[in-house]
Amino acid sequence: MSGNDNQLRVLISGGGTGGHIFPALSIANEIKRRLPQAKILFVGAEGRMEMERVPAAGYEIKGLPVMGFDRKNLLRNIKILYKLQQSLRMARGILKDFNPNVAVGVGGYASGPMLKECQKKGIPTLLQEQNSFAGVTNKLLAKKAQCICVAYEGMERFFPAEKIVLTGNPVRRNLLECTATPQEARQSFGLDPDKRTVLIVGGSLGARTINTSIIDGLDKIAGHDNVQVIWQTGKIYDDNCREALQSSQAANVKQMAFISNMDKAYRAADLVISRAGASSISELQLLGKASILVPSPNVAEDHQTKNAMALVDRNAALMIPDAEAGAKLVDVMLDTIEQEQMLVKLSENVLKMALRDSAEVIVDKVLQIAK
């Protein structure tokens, strides 16, 4: 970059779920840490999670009316195509006003129109693909991108090999900076400092299958006095799960809608039960947590199962398909938490898969391609 290079202008686009938003914010924070004068603008999809989360983190965001294609109801796609045209027009306006040196796409359909317009204008673009199975938007944008940052090996089957950089997924910094001991972390949740602890999380919105499996197994859990559970249910399922817990005998389960201090929750846990979204898996790898993964069946191209299998194949996690969770999850959880050696093995193997300093490596690339 020539001239006044402390005035770097970066456009970051994408979103739809926490899995796209956390990495995007980590990248923005790392740019700001190095170049406090840099101008950063986010572009997301109207009505989606990023429109709240990004301003809350202190960044400006513009929303496009873009929607994902409807694979089931093809007639709805007429409206979606109209919104796509509208979004492309708005994207051109945003480019004219903001005039970025570089654009970062973090995936999700929100990044499609914006990065397409950037590429047309010759603005260098970097893509960040969180999953082991590439998303449609990133596959379409890959041909004209300067650099594609990935979290898994073997991504040459989706992207041009010479553009791929294996960086891992950026995770929330505070998770890696927790200083509490496991005992202190358990006490902060009002739990016994010395009991084996399971953390159950369903992502930011909660996970129905995991929650109903736990509800059905509360009596079994109550029978294991030497185990305790931290159960994040998500807002939608909060009332249901709380009522079920109150009418059960399970005094060893601590339930909440949302955990704000995830760093301590992870630190408290000997075993984690989770969906297999890209952010969750990166967190488990970096923190070296033994886990049982229940991939969500409601995601494009079933990529959560592929994410989970990448760990299972290395003996770095256990997996239970969503359809089998009702029958198996609680039994496998109670069995696994008793097996010290298995927990240690899973933990060691998943830690080996961790890719550190992802945000730093990605920002190195962003600065390198910024014109």
Image: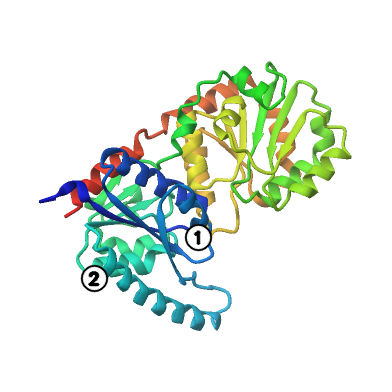
Q: Nearer the viewer, residue 196 or 114?
A: 114
Where is 205 relative to 270, above or below? below
Secondary structure, mark 1, is helix
State the residue at coordinates (55%, 35%): 317
Q: Give whichever of discs 2 and 1 has the lower sequence position.
A: 2
Amino acid at dot 2: Lys
| Residue 137 as seen in the image, left or right of residue 250 | left
| Residue 76 as seen in the image, left or right of residue 338 | left
Q: Nearer the viewer, residue 362 or 354?
A: 362
Q: Quadrant of residue 99?
A: bottom left
Q: Quadrant of residue 255?
A: top right
Looking at the picture, how far across and down is residue 222, in whole percent?
83, 30
Looking at the picture, how far across and down is residue 14, in whole percent?
41, 59
**Location of mark 2 (residue):** 120
Q: Which is closer to the viewer, label 2 or label 1? A: 2
Q: Is residue 313 visible?
A: no
Secondary structure, mark 2, is helix
Q: Which mark is residue 301?
A: 1
Looking at the picture, how far across and down is residue 319, in whole percent?
60, 41
The residue carrying pointer 2 sits among few (fewer than 14), some (14 to 19) or many (20 or more) residues within 10 Å by Cα, namely few
| Residue 56 as seen in the image, left or right of residue 96 | right
Amino acid at dot 1: Glu
Query: How many dots with numbers?
Result: 2
The residue carrying pointer 1 sits among few (fewer than 14), some (14 to 19) or many (20 or more) residues within 10 Å by Cα, namely few
State the residue at coordinates (52%, 26%): 347
Looking at the picture, how far across and down is residue 182, in whole percent?
59, 20
Q: Quadrant of residue 334?
A: top right
